[in-house]
Amino acid sequence: MKLKYIFFLPFLIMLAAGCSKPKKSEITFTVPTGTFSGTFKQLRYNATTKDYDSVQTNISLSMNLQDGYQVTADSTIHANSHGNFSVNPYYIAFDDFTFSGTELPAIPHLLGTYGYDYDGSKLHMQQTYSDTLGFFYDLVKQ
């Protein structure tokens, strides 16, 4: 008779686990704010040479949750711009007020969603389009 109850033990354990309340996990992260400077690098696949072409410039980025962001760079390689941004632990989304088009601009703007890594001092952001185009920002807090 007791042997029959042993077969019900796994079901009772699953029932107990399903009815228990999960622990609420809070994800904490440091929002990148302040003034950052460093380099912007663009890699673009060249179908003719079957290799990547790259351009690089120095860039400055100011970020503030109340006022948004502002970019200053060599305007022939990266557009100077400003706008709002939102951030979560994995991505930063930039809304550039100086760009109103629907296609990728000829000169890169800080626009769209970027994966990022921030340790409180160094800010690395990247945005890639398939295997043909990539934008990489390596910045340090000032």
Image (cartoon, rainbow, N blue to C red):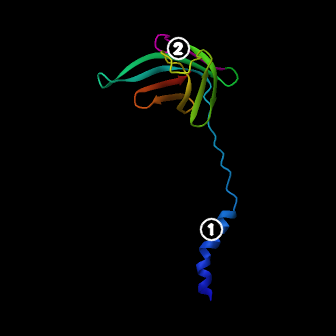
In front: 116, or 95?
Answer: 95
In the visual, does 111 lie left or right of 51? right
Q: Which mark is residue 116?
A: none
Measured from the top left, where is residue 113 in percent x and y? 56, 29
Residue 89 quadrant: top right
Q: Give SS at disc 2.
A: loop
Q: Residue at x 51, y 24 (%)?
A: 139
In magenta segment, residue 72: yes
Which amino acid type is shown beneath numbered disc 1? Met
* Position of residue 58 measured from the top left corner of the image (x, y, whole percent): 47, 16
Please tell me how crowded label 1 is: few (under 14), some (14-19), or many (20+) other residues with Cα within 10 Å.
Answer: few
Q: Is residue 56 left or right of residue 94?
A: left
Indicate whether residue 115 is drawn in magenta: no
The picture quadrant where one finds residue 62 is: top right
Query: Residue at horizontal 59%, vertical 25%?
Result: 94
- Name the residue tied to disc 2: 79
Q: For the N terminus, which image quadrant?
A: bottom right
Amino acid type assigned to the residue bearing label 2 in the image: Ala
Residue drawn at point x = 62 percent, y = 87 percent: 2
Highlighted range, magenta: 68-79
Residue that protrudes farthest toward the left in the picture: 49
In the current view of this chain or complex, which residue is farthest to the front? 102
The correct choice, above or below, for 72 with respect to 118 in the image is above
Residue topped by disc 1: 14
- Choose the circle earlier in sequence order: 2 or 1: 1
* Image coordinates for residue 67, horizontal then vertical, percent: 68, 20
Displayed quadrant of residue 69: top right
In the displayed structure, would residue 73 be above or below residue 29?
above
Residue occupying the point 42% across, 26% down: 133
